[in-house]
Amino acid sequence: MQRIILVLSALIVLMVWSSCRKDFAYTPNPGNLEFSKDTVYLDTVFSKISSSTYSLKVYNPNRDAIEIPTIRLKQGQNSFYRMNVDGVAGKEFTNIPILAQDSLYIFIETTVDLSNGLENEFLYTDAIAFEGKMITQEVQLVTLVKDAVFHYPKTLADGTKETLSLDMGLNGAPIQVEGFYLQEDELHFTKDKPHVIYGYAVVPENQVLLMDSGSRIHFHKDSGIYMGNGASLQIDGALSLDQALLENEVILEGDRLEPQYTDIPGQWGGIWFAEGSIDNRITYATLKNATVALMVKGDGLMQSPTLTLENTRIHNASNTNLWTQNAHVLAENTLLGGAGRNALRCDLGGRYVFTHCTIANYWSHGSRSGTALFLGNHDTSNTGDLISAEFNNCIIDGNAPLEISLRHNGLNAFNFNFDHSLIKFEDTSGQYANTDLYDFGDTTYYNNVFLNQNADFKDVIQNNFLIGEASMARNKALLETALNVPYDILGTSRTDNPDIGAYEFMPDN
């Protein structure tokens, strides 16, 4: 027993002594390192905006611990890339150890400045060099950098950002936001360069903000556009020949261009149309990944539409795609897709005409709190007349059993009608069986509606709302209405046996 205790004591002393050694022997790097990738693509970034952080794993395949004499960026201190090795940031590192058959992580970022006269779009490259005993190995770094026109609030003397008091509270109270007024020479967005907005860009009273066909508008987090009294927004997109590139559409989205941000909701605020904003028109545009993509406030008295939407797609808002309050909105060939609350929310009354629209809330980012369509004149703080709400040849659908919600305060006017439309409302529990507003046999509200039928969308997760061969929407639209909107959102004729919704069925889809 005593002998065993002596042996164990010796082993413990040996282990403690080994762990305290400072002169552990490393073999010089033989130059046979292995890497998780031979090229690190940092995707696309805007000039002067930092990229996401990317990782590279470096493997030591040898049976001996090795030491890498130098890990460095080939362009040295002039490189636009940055590295972090073993928790230390820099552009060159010396005597980096890796234990036998172990690995090391390197993290890489970049911020490229194209203000020195480089092209509007520039492929920026460098390489990480790993010195070995006989050879030096390299891993390539590649980033596509785009120049842009930047719009942002001024930085004040105390280091804070310029702020404005804007009527953006849902209760009508102004709130302070980082913002600035667009100057006269900033009111025309072209496709020559992307535009990047920080904070809220305010269009001055009685001014018009124009966006040309093919323009790309990007917003930083919590940023957007504010249309004040008398201000107008004119988005003049056009039909694209390539539905992947959308070369002629105007696209409004966040300022992170990396693929992992493609479908992340809530990346930017939205466009706010304050009461008094007039003659707004959006044609052939895509708005995605906002919080409330379009907020439209009106006084209910305007005879002409506050906002007209044509051939426009709005989807993936973390709250609501299109939210109106006592407004006047006309929409044709418009897709309102998935949203965290409502695809379309019409509050406090107003006037609305939606023709050949697809309102389909297939939210895929967790649970949602609302229906595809909310229509009401009831609110805890206000009420208004729903003068009219017409849904002609429209699809109202989604991945919840009940996809319309109607809220009437019982006092003000509440006039609505669905004509030749597909509606999903699976009231299996009979909760609304005795509610007049949901009496789908009442032709005052519902005329030739198709209840709980298969829309047969192509791929709702990818926001592809083309209808398939099995869709009940096929050949069910009212021709008289369709002739007023003779082409669908993709330019396909609907003058013969038209389909319900924004898309006509095409056999080769």
Image: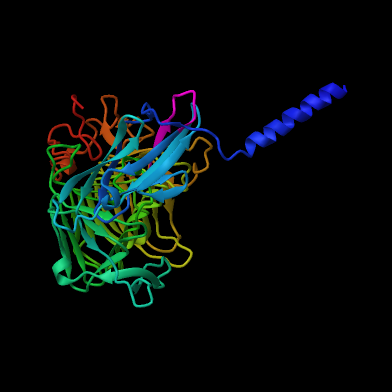
Whether residue 218 is visible to the viewer of this picture, yes or no, is yes
Q: Give the left or right position of residue 209, taking residue 139 as reference.
A: left
Q: Is residue 61 magenta?
A: yes
Q: Quadrant of residue 479?
A: top left
Q: Give the left or right position of residue 180, taking residue 433 as reference.
A: left
Residue 192 or residue 437, whichever sits in front:
192
Q: Residue furthest right?
A: 1
Residue drawn at x 35%, y 30% is: 454
Whether residue 333 is visible to the viewer of this picture, yes or no, is no
Q: Residue furthest bottom?
A: 157
Where is 361 relative to 46, above or below? Answer: above
Q: How is the image coloured?
A: rainbow
Locate the N terminus by quadrant.
top right
Residue drawn at x 27%, y 56% is: 48
Q: Give the left or right position of residue 239, taking residue 302 as reference.
A: left
Locate the C terminus by quadrant.
top left
Spot occupied by residue 295 in the image (x, y as percentages of width and height): 33, 59
Where is 20 relative to 444, above or below? Answer: above
Residue 432 or residue 502, whichever sits in front:
502
Where is 327 relative to 69, above or below? Answer: below
Residue drawn at x 43%, y 67% is: 382
Spot occupied by residue 328 in the image (x, y as percentages of width and height): 27, 60
Spot occupied by residue 26 in the image (x, y as percentages of width and height): 49, 32
Spot occupied by residue 237 in the image (x, y as percentages of width and height): 15, 50
Q: How many marks?
A: 0
Residue drawn at x 30%, y 62% is: 198
Residue 353 or residue 112, whichever sits in front:
112
Q: Quadrant of residue 29?
A: top left
Q: Is residue 382 magenta?
A: no
Magenta range is 54-66
Where is 174 relative to 56, above or below? Answer: below
